[in-house]
């Protein structure tokens, strides 16, 4: 692959080009990463459960190969995501056989943040401190009495209210390298009512004096993008004094025909029908994915004064979480073709278009 087709090099004056990776994919796409990217995110290997499976017993064996790859690339990583309602070990919420008190959970978050920073600090330029803490919908007061209209009713929230979010940001601010930025990361971040919840969460942190440097706009596109709302969202977040990273960009086959707003999830009305339609790969759908990438990057470039990084959630189409999203065990894999490079690691037509768009 010629140097002229390097996205990272072409976009140096705009923003970093990143990829979420696993140790296996680092090995398989070693040369592609060197040629095309200048930022890395560990897909799962820096989350709570892999790094502290037992209290006080830390393990970085899975994350270290990703850090080694970043060093070979002479770049730093986006560290994702210490506090999240998923991939958190059960012991986090327990004190013996009783629910843990908020103060104990805060102590554990603090110890975890300290250990992560002691191990990774020199290699990290941004932390996704808290991930996906807002809810998708308005709770039914009869079915869900007492639930917050803003915050996800996770085990963290049930035990601590919003305190766990504040504790996470205060701890990471204390231990992170001075030049590392602290981010809140979420999906459906351009849907107006979900965006309002995200804004409320971040403003609450700001009012409490917590350091929040940026917002991670995941940009998982499982519906036809609303480009106006993407622009509006970037402006809203930027006006809050936040830097912006696009953190988990991919374009599902569903984005070529789903006219909805929210990211459809297993169990949602219409999900199975959309999955069946997504199984039908056609040249027309693949062309639409290319067009969406071109339009998105046009928007991202226009806000390069506030956007510092654009990261795809994966490297190439040979492996992507979307191939398994919502599928029951034993179901056929759905090739969603959501990334910028195909199953062979070759650039899709849109890559040349993205590079042509920034040529002097």
Image: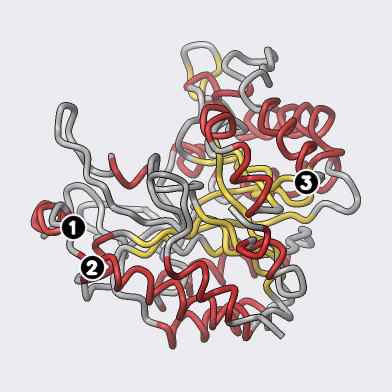
Identify which residue, 127 or 325, lies in the foreground: 325
Colour scheme of the rendered structure: secondary structure
Q: Residues within 10 Å of mark 3 (few under 14, many from 20)?
A: many
Name the secondary structure under disc 1: loop
| Residue 127 position (above or below residue 186) | above
The quadrant of the rendering that contains the C terminus is: bottom right
Q: Residue at x 45, y 47 (%)?
A: 316
Identify which residue, 295 or 172, lies in the foreground: 295
- Between the residue at mark 1 and the residue at mark 3, the CA separation in whole angstroms equals 36 Å
Measuring from the top left, give residue 99's x and y in whole percent: 49, 24
Q: Residue at x 54, y 64 (%)?
A: 217
Q: Which residue is mark 3?
A: 76
Which tag is nearer the camera, tag 3 or tag 2?
2
| Residue 68 position (above or below residue 7) | above
Disc nearer the start of the sequence (3/2): 3
Measuring from the top left, give residue 243's x and y in whole percent: 71, 70
Q: Which residue is mark 1?
A: 281
Q: Residue at x 28, y 44 (%)?
A: 325
Whether the residues at callouts 3 and 2 have beta carbons within 8 Å, the answer is no
- Between the residue at mark 3 and the residue at mark 2, the CA separation in whole angstroms equals 35 Å
Q: Residues within 10 Å of mark 2 (few under 14, many from 20)?
A: some
Camera sees residue 303 = yes
| Residue 281 position (above or below residue 197) | above
Camera sees residue 215 = no
Question: In this rendering, would 268 be left or right of 306?
Answer: left
Name the secondary structure under disc 3: loop
The image quadrant of residue 190 is: bottom left
Whether the residues at callouts 2 and 1 have beta carbons within 8 Å, the answer is yes
Q: Residues within 10 Å of mark 1 (few under 14, many from 20)?
A: some
Q: Which residue is mark 2?
A: 285
Measuring from the top left, give residue 181's x and y in whole percent: 78, 56
């Amino acid at each position: 692959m010629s140097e002229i087709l390097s996205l990272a090099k072409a976009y140096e004056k705009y923003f970093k080009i990143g990829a979420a990776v696993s140790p296996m994919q680092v090995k398989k796409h070693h040369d592609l990463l060197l040629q095309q990217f200048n930022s890395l995110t560990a897909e799962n290997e820096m989350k709570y459960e892999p790094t502290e499976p037992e209290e006080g017993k830390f393990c970085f064996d899975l994350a270290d190969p990703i850090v080694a790859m970043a060093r070979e690339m002479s770049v730093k990583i986006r560290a994702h995501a210490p506090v999240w309602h998923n991939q958190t070990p059960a012991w986090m919420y327990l004190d013996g056989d009783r629910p843990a008190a908020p103060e104990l959970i805060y102590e554990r978050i603090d110890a975890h943040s300290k250990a992560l920073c002691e191990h990774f600090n020199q290699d990290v330029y941004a932390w996704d401190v808290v991930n996906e803490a807002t809810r998708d919908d308005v709770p039914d007061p009869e079915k869900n009495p007492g639930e917050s209209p803003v915050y996800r009713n996770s085990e963290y929230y049930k035990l601590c209210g919003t305190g766990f979010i504040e504790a996470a940001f205060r701890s990471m601010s204390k231990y992170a390298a001075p030049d590392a930025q602290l981010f809140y990361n979420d999906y459906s971040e351009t849907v107006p009512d979900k965006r309002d919840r995200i804004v409320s969460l971040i403003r609450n942190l700001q009012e409490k004096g917590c350091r929040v440097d940026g917002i991670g706009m995941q940009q998982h596109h499982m519906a036809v993008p609303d480009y106006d709302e993407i622009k509006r969202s970037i402006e809203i977040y930027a006006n809050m004094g936040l830097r912006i990273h696009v953190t988990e960009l991919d374009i599902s086959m569903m984005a070529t025909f789903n006219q909805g707003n929210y990211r459809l999830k297993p169990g949602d009305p219409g999900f199975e029908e959309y999955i069946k339609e997504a199984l039908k790969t056609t040249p027309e759908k693949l062309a639409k994915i290319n067009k969406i990438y071109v339009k998105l990057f046009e928007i991202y470039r226009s806000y390069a004064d506030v956007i510092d990084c654009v990261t795809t959630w994966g490297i190439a189409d040979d492996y992507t979480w979307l191939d398994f999203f919502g599928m029951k065990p034993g179901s056929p894999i759905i090739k969603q073709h959501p990334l910028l490079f195909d199953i062979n690691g070759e650039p899709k037509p849109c890559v040349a278009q993205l590079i042509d768009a920034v040529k002097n």
